[in-house]
Image (cartoon, helix red, strand yellow):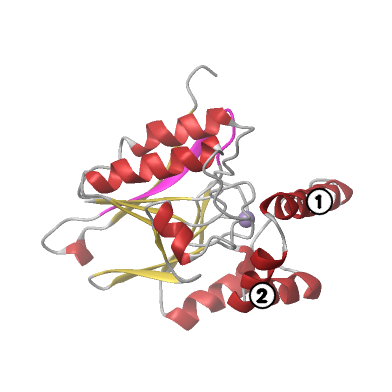
């Protein structure tokens, strides 16, 4: 049995090669397996659009995983936090809390998107808190049309890209001190996160493992594979970070 963890696919109508890669990758998820998408599945998300090929594909792909007995779970990223429980149902996935724990015997693995592990500005922290309130989201969806919401999301994306460029493309990183104290608070030895787009394993010391799932681009993608046995799951959990090239590149 295997649990796959992926993040930062950034699917959109403009990047069909990523949607195709997701489709192919999903074929490896068998009936005994679980797929965890830990945020930023979509490049931006302001509601279901049945005409959007990325939305259609996610629904189809997840439906096919579910129909063979597999399960798909989703944790919000900073780009798709507006995806609510009803939307998750449409996409055939189960919406989890922002912090989720997997327990295999005595091994506990924490999963988060990862933006909360970075050094964010006070402004972003306030925005994150405010924008995740369901009453605010409900108001946003009621007050503005889908087209209007798309426009606002695109403006926010443009501003974020400009800020990233202004900072000279500084590599996004988690704060290791914050991350360790986060892990200690939850009493876990393993943490898997996305958001920072660097597929890598960090071992602050022998007791802790921090894995960045990496992202999906037109040249390739990465994912975390957690293999666990049936009988004594705590004793034989194997965690690996795997990379794949997108064929044709
Ligand atoms: Mn993110």
Cα gap from disc 1 to disc 2, whole angstroms: 19 Å
Quarter of the figure with residue 14: top right
Q: Is residue 180 visible?
A: yes
Quarter of the figure with residue 179: bottom right
Q: Dot 1 lies on which element?
A: helix
Q: Dot 2 lies on which element?
A: helix
The first of marks 1 and 2 along the sequence is 2
Question: Residue at label 2?
Answer: 136
User: Magenta span has 59?
Assistant: no
At x 42%, y 53%, the residue is 90
Residue at the extreme bottom: 185
- Observer-side mark, 1 or 2, equals 2
Q: Is residue 205 visible?
A: no
User: Magenta span has 217?
Assistant: yes
The answer to whether 8 is drawn above or below residue 132 in the figure is above
At x 51%, y 37%, the residue is 221
Q: Are marks 1 and 2 in contact (CB under 8 Å)?
A: no
Ligand 1 within 8 Å of disc 1? The answer is no
- Magenta segment's dominant SS is strand
The answer to whether 85 is drawn above or below residue 23 in the figure is below
Which of the pair 175/111 is nearer the observer? 111
Instruction: Give the x, y percent position of residue 98.
Output: 51, 70
Question: Residue at label 1?
Answer: 155
- Magenta stretch bounds: 216-227
At x 79%, y 46%, the residue is 169
At x 63%, y 70%, the residue is 137
Q: Quadrant of ligand 1?
A: bottom right
């Amino acid at each position: 049995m295997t649990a796959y963890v992926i993040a930062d696919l950034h699917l959109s109508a403009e990047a069909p090669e990523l949607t195709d890669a997701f489709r192919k990758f999903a074929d490896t998820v068998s009936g005994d397996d679980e797929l965890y998408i830990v945020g930023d599945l979509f490049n931006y998300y302001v509601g279901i659009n049945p005409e959007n090929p990325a939305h259609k594909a996610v629904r189809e792909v997840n439906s096919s995983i579910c129909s063979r007995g597999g399960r798909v779970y989703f944790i919000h990223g900073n780009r798709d936090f507006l995806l609510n429980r009803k939307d998750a149902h449409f996409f055939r996935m189960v919406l989890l809390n922002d912090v989720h724990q997997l327990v295999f015997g005595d091994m506990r693995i924490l999963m988060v998107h990862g933006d909360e592990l970075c050094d964010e500005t006070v402004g972003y922290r306030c925005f994150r808190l405010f924008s995740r309130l369901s009453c605010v989201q409900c108001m946003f969806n009621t007050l503005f049309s889908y087209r209007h919401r798309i426009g606002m999301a695109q403006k926010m994306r443009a501003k974020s890209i400009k800020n990233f460029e202004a900072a000279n493309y500084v590599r996004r990183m988690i704060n290791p001190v914050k991350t360790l104290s986060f892990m200690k608070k939850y009493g876990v030895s393993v943490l898997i996160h996305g958001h920072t787009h660097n597929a890598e394993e960090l071992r602050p010391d022998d007791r802790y493992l921090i894995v960045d799932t990496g992202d999906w681009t037109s040249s390739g993608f990465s994912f975390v594979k957690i293999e666990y046995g049936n009988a004594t799951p705590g004793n034989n959990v194997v965690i690996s970070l795997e990379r794949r090239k997108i064929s044709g590149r």
